[in-house]
Amino acid sequence: MTLLILGGTGDARRLAEALQGTDAIISLAGATRSPDKLPMPSRVGGFGGEQGFRDYLTQNSISAVLDATHPFADRITTRTARVCADIGMPYLQLLRPGWSAEPGDDWTEIACEEDAVDHIPVGATVFLGTGRQTLDRFANLEAREVICRQIDPPSDPFPFKGGRFLVGRPPFSVEDEMQLFLALGVDCLVVKNAGGAASRTKLTAANHLGIPVLMIARPPRGDWSIVDNVQSALEWVKAL
């Protein structure tokens, strides 16, 4: 049996560490230019669309797919689940729980990036913890100062006026985030409800500083098999 892990998250790394030495391959989309080395064979980049993905599964004798991509990688997840269902291949999504507000949090849930403008006054300083992939969806925030943090140095200019990139590689402690937000004069934090303890530090920092948060809601869950923790995913692999 050859297992294909779709990675790019901390959970995927933990799966790779637990499954090293087994017949498995981990695939990364290539969103980060210099990803940390993984303890199993890996590939980087897309598959070339749905047919390319189907061909890859066949050519590499893949027996099962474990999807540990980002909770907002819904197009990849939906396509993968559909292809696996079509060919009768075992498929599982590892979808970590989303964040829930805690005492002192000032969160407003929004459906999509374009809705943020309705909650941010003109002239405010906005910190985007959403990554660069959906940055163009915030173009209606032109009358604000927009700061987008990303891991790699930008290869293209900021896509709209009033914005700039900030390069930083996680992990970030709560203290790091508080100092950064104070130095930048952040008035509002915008994040996707990705879940995970490591990424929550920016939310804790916003709580301590009284900074309001716009929380982009997750895509709807699919009707395929889903677990919410690494141990359950490993048990699924063991049972194959």
Image (cartoon, rainbow, N blue to C red):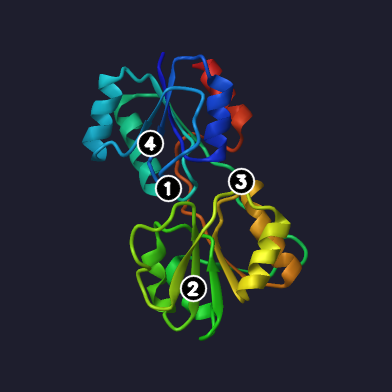
Say which element carries label 4. Answer: helix
Give the residue number, with chain letter if any, for mark 2.
146
Query: Which marked residue is nearer to the observer: mark 4 or mark 2?
Result: 2
Against 189, residue 72 (above or below) is above
Q: Spatial distance from mark 1 to mark 4, Cα to Cα?
A: 12 Å
Query: Which marked residue is nearer to the observer: mark 1 or mark 3?
Result: 1
Say which element carries label 2. Answer: strand
User: Where residue 73 is drawn, which disc sits there?
Assistant: 1
Q: Spatial distance from mark 1 to mark 3, Cα to Cα?
A: 15 Å
Viewer-nearest residue: 188 or 98: 188
Mark 1 or mark 4, which has the lower sequence index?
Answer: 1
Mark 1 or mark 2, which has the lower sequence index?
Answer: 1
User: Where residue 97 is drawn, which disc sits there?
Assistant: 3
> How many marks can you see?
4
Mark 3 or mark 2, which has the lower sequence index?
Answer: 3
**x and y percent of residue 185 in the render?**
63, 76
Give the residue number, with chain letter if any, for mark 4.
81
Q: Quadrant where the N terminus lies?
A: top left
Say which element carries label 3. Answer: loop
Q: Residues within 10 Å of mark 2 (few under 14, many from 20)?
A: many
Labels 1 and 4 touching (C-beta < 8 A): no
Labels 4 and 3 touching (C-beta < 8 A): no
Work out which residue is located at the far bottom of the displayed protein and give it.
122
Labels 1 and 3 touching (C-beta < 8 A): no
Q: Residues within 10 Å of mark 4 (few under 14, many from 20)?
A: many
Q: Spatial distance from mark 4 to mark 3, Cα to Cα?
A: 19 Å
